[in-house]
Structures are given as structure tokens and as C-alpha cells.
Image (cartoon, rainbow, N blue to C red):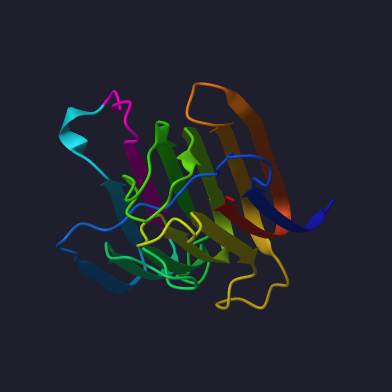
Amino acid sequence: MKRTFMLLVFLSLVLVSFVGTAQAARTIPASNETSTLIVEVTAYADTSLRARTDLVLCQGNEDLRDNPPLNSSGEGVNCIIHQEHTMATSGSTYYAKDIMVDTGNQIDPANNLKTTRHIDFSATSDGTPAGNMYSSESTTVTSTSTAYTGAGCCNWGIQDSATLSSTCDQVTAGSEVSLYEGEVTSDSSARIIAAFIEEPVEITYSVNVGPSAQTGEDHAKGSATAYVEADITEGSGDGTAESTDMGYDQSTTVRGLIDLVMEVSFSTGGS
């Protein structure tokens, strides 16, 4: 019996604090020297292919080398983590991956990270029935800070007499596929660095699994999982009071003749 699965998942998480002096995760100003890294990869293989990406970008408003712990005067650290591992055997594989990393201050809609990935795999197009393509990918944003009270120029780089409260947030979105035939397209972006804290910390991730362009099939064949995890803890005032605590965990898996689409958007703000 043939089974066909078609799933569309859309998730938008927006954390905004409106009461008192509560704050959501905040962007951190860039260092005096900034850099931009751009990588573009295009590959084809009719037997095997392996690709790997591991990226960690952290920005702090004090010395990163003496952490943990963060000091108690308003130190903050934001990080972006991006990972992708792909392996294809005994098939025909088209692979493309573009990555842009910018450590400078960003203003919406610009981001510190932008990635795109496209994989088209067919186990039979090379004339053999055996073959498999496995690929996993995830993008994570973390934001951690201690509370700080002060008039004038605060540790976050703006003129502000308000209290900046503590925060500890982590959001991860990703996907995992194991395909006999199929195509995977994904995009992600993240922002953690900005000159002013009014700019939100953001992460977006989208993935689309469908039929291979190398065959005349209507669906991909194999299995696919798309997931998102969020742990949000926010303080209120300059003490240790915890005013927001949220956990979110979602995973969707399909097997057989499949299609899968997921879009994730997370944004923070404060007032």
C-alpha cells in the first residue's frame, strides 16, 4: 500500500514584554572591528558526496574569555550556531550551499547570518537501484545576560535610565532527511548584533521537502523530520526575579511518499 503524506507547518514565536521594566532578549553592539564571510558551494556527484558546515558566532559586551559566569553588572552574550551535515551514496546528487556571516551592527531586515541550501538526490538516476541521501541541519540563537541598573550610558550602548533585566533564551530550528528520491530546500537567518537594543533578536528557518527534479515522481521517497525547540526565561527589574518562563518543543516526521514544509520565525522585543 502506498501512502502519501503532505504537511505544512508554520510557527511564529514573538516574545514582547509590555509591563513594568521587563525586557526580552536584546541585541548587543558590534566590536570596533567587524568582518564579513561569504561562502558559495555548488557540487555534483554521481556516486557519493559529503558536505559539512559548523559555525559559531558569539558577541558580548564585555570579555568573552572569562565566561562563564557572566558578571553581575549587566554583561550579555548572544550566539548564533549553525550546523549542517550531508552524506549521499550510490546516487546522483546536486548540492548547493550559500552562507553569509556579518559581525557588524544590523538593522531589520538585515541579519548577521543568512544561509540557503538545495539538495536534489536520486538513487536510480545513475542506473543502480541502491542509494541514500542523509542530511541534517539546524540553526540556533542564544541570548544570555545579567541584570543592570544605571543612568546615562548603560552597558548595552544606548542612553537609557531604565532597568535592564536578566535573560536566558535559546531557540533552535532544524530538519533531518533520509531520502531515496527527493529534493530539499532550506533557508535560515539570524540577528544578534545591533547598535541599539530596540533591534530585536531574530531567527527564521524554513525547509521544503518534495520530489526530485531528476525523476517524474510527484513526491519524495524516504523520511523527513522538521523541528523547533525554544526555552525562554526572562527577568523583571534589576534583581533575580523570573517573570517569564516558556518552553516549546515540536517535531513532525513523515515516511513513505512524502512532502513536508515548515516555516519558523522567532523575534524578541521589549519596552
Is residue 211 placed above or below 135 in the rendered structure?
A: below
> Could you tell me what secondary structure mostly forms the magenta stretch?
strand
Residue at position x 64%, y 31% in the image: 244
Closer to us: 216 or 162: 162
**Place of residue 51 in the rendered image (x, y in percent of width and height, measured from the top left):** 32, 57
Closer to us: 76 or 214: 76
Residue at position x 64%, y 39% in the image: 20
Left or right: 35, with 10 as reference point: left
Magenta-span inclusion, residue 74: yes
**Residue range (magenta):** 68-90
Left or right: 236, with 261 as reference point: left
Closer to us: 233 or 3: 233
Question: In this view of the protein, can residue 30 be seen by the observer?
Answer: yes
- Indicate the quadrant where residue 72 lies: top left
Closer to us: 181 or 64: 64
Magenta-span inclusion, residue 234: no
Most distant residue in the right direction? 1
**Place of residue 114 in the rendered image (x, y in percent of width and height, measured from the top left):** 41, 67
